[in-house]
Amino acid sequence: NGETGAGKTSLLYNIALHAAVSQPLWGHRFGIDKPLRLLYVDAENFDRTTGGNALTKIDRIGLGRPDNLILHDGRDIDLSKPE
C-alpha cells in the first residue's frame, strides 16, 4: 500500500523478473539457483491484447521477458488448472 507513483509495481516486477531468471536482486538470491516459474496477476497494468503498461515497465528493467514469467490480468483465472 502506498501513494500513486511510489514504485510499488516496479518493485514487484523487479522481484518477479529476477526470480524468473534466477539472478540476485540487491544482493539477495532466489530459490535454488534455477529459474522459477511465476504467475504475475496484474489487473491494473496488464492487458491480454496489448500488454498494457506492464510490458513497458518490464522492458525498462532490462532482463527481457522470460517464458517462465506468465503475466495475467486476473480475468477468468482458475488456479486449480495446471495451464
Image (cartoon, grey):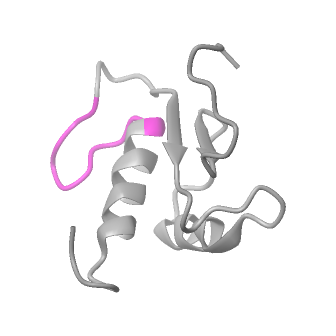
Side of 10 where 79 appears, left or right: right
| Residue toward you, 15 or 74 | 74
Question: Where's residue 74, x and y in %?
Answer: 60, 46
Q: In which quarter of the image is residue 29?
A: top left
Q: Per the image, is 26 magenta? A: yes
**76 in relation to 16, above or below:** above
> Start and end of the magenta stretch?
20-30
Residue at (30% x, 69% y) in the render = 8
Question: Where's residue 59, x and y in %?
Answer: 59, 68
The quarter of the image holding the N terminus is bottom left
Side of 49 where 52 appears, left or right: left
The residue most toward the right is 49
The quarter of the image holding the C terminus is top right
- Dominant SS type (magenta): loop
Q: Per the image, is 3 magenta? A: no
Residue at (65% x, 14% y) in the render = 81
Residue at (54% x, 67% y) in the render = 44
